[in-house]
Amino acid sequence: MHIFSHKRLIFCLTCFFATFSLFFSSMIAATKGKQSTVLEHWSAQIIADRLEESLSFGREIKAYYDRKYPSLSGRIYIEQSNDVVTVHWFADYPDVRSFRRINRQLGLDEEFIALMSKMQGFIVAGTVQQKLLRPYATLEKIKPVANLVQGQEGTIYFTSANSGSFKEILASGSQSKPATISGTLSLPKNISAKVPAVIILHGAGGVNDFYFEMADILNEMGIAAFVVDSFENRGIVFGVEILKKVFHSYSTRIADAYAALKLLSTHPQVDKNRIAVMGFSHGARVALFVAAENISKSFYKGELQFAASIAYYPNCFPQFENIRFTKAPILLLLGERDNICPISACLDYARRMQAAGADVKTIVYKGAHHQFPVLPDNVLIMAPSLPDWSHCKQESYILLQDDGNWFFPHRNETVDEVNAYGDYTANCRLNGQAMVGGNHKAKIESIKECQNLLKQVFQLE
């Protein structure tokens, strides 16, 4: 089992590669004429009296890096003050997908983890920033489709909205600004009649390979799959940034879910009455929001509804004050050891939903952490960019009222949805203690639960 910080892995890579390169080549040559999409800036401090040791190890890092990622360009500079050396490293990625792919691969590569494990203790402190450089003029040239009447598949650009707030959603307001987002639609083979579909909503880290693995599983069942990307065209590279304005991002992604539902309903091979939603983490919370009757009626007057909601490890601290859900079944799939979205709040919420008449099934997987189906089996990684919420109890619950306001019952106070939640939970959150981990057994069992529910809801043999 590997227990190591994913961000620290990347930290070490860039810092020691940067240090090595500084003394041996001063700069990595950038690819001429290349239009960068993502500029990544790492800043890290290294104990000065260990620089020679880091230089020696830098040769190993450079050999690994040049072999695996020879096309990545970057530049560095170094500052020294007393006994601390600060290394700055800028990397240019040609596109968002390569940025995500390389960062994901580094965090899971056995060889790289073994290399980095040698270097624990070198880093004193550090920060990271990522910035999307893709010109918006390019985005404007992408023409979203109005419908899928031509039976399109693959990558599809369509129109959603940057929703302003839950007040706006519940009032069916018109203040939202349109936004172009994308999704990847895959259909089953040998279609003889209209098929059901599942809309897959990613977590705060964006789209990853598991969602497409899940899409393949659905296709084999005779179900279409639409993996929606809420981030790339909005310029969100490192999605954890959205958690700073968590409710604002939820309302926007609710608009994405319904835009995808409307779009899929126009496809000649999709049964518009058999479209479910499956969400992970941040997307799972959205999957629970769209199960609410009042939110459903705010979009298309409830004429189009999700047939089921599947939520993998959602954040359950935000809840509805008055629970009125549609008749669609809800499946909650939770990790026992999840300290990012602790199960206690979800179990409480499930009891409230059941008491209100909602069709809810909750399953807790023993020993499983956040992202248990996404990561390889027995890989356990510290995620310092995410908070540990496991010490937050009922005083952290916040209730969505019928008018769209958020209410803290333990404070008897209504709060601004955009920024307040982080301030109100600061006393119980622990930074730098969040863990994510893979659990193959829980993954397989959870997929079977999804299949069983969908077979029942979609009336599949």
Image: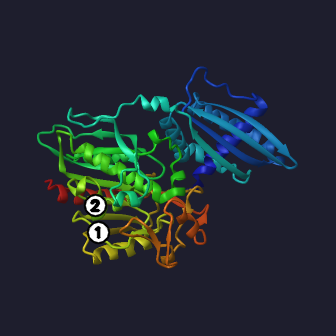
Q: Which residue is rendered at x = 33% and y = 36% of the image?
A: 156
Which amino acid, mark 2? Glu
Q: Are marks 2 and 1 in contact (CB under 8 Å)?
A: yes
The single residue placed furthest to the top in the displayed view is 33
Q: CA distance from mark 2 to mark 1?
A: 10 Å
Q: Position of residue 360 (x, y in %)?
A: 28, 69
Q: As displayed, is residue 217 above or below residue 446?
A: above
Q: Which mark is residue 361?
A: 1
Q: As displayed, is residue 448 above or below residue 22?
A: below
Q: As displayed, is residue 55 above or below residue 120?
A: above
Which amino acid, mark 1? Lys
Screen quadrant of the C terminus: bottom left
Q: Quadrant of the rendered structure where residue 177 is?
A: top left
Q: Position of residue 439 (x, y in %)?
A: 43, 58
Q: Position of residue 377 (x, y in %)?
A: 45, 55
Q: Position of residue 355 (x, y in %)?
A: 29, 78
The single residue placed furthest to the front in the displayed view is 174
Q: Which mark is residue 449?
A: 2
Q: Identify the mark nearer the N-term, 2 or 1.
A: 1
Q: Nearer the viewer, residue 358 or 332?
A: 358
Residue 27 visible in the current orientation? yes
Q: Nearer the viewer, residue 57 or 198?
A: 198
Judged left or right of residue 169, residue 338 is right
Badge 1 element? strand
Q: Nearer the viewer, residue 219 or 54?
A: 219
The single residue placed furthest to the left in the displayed view is 192
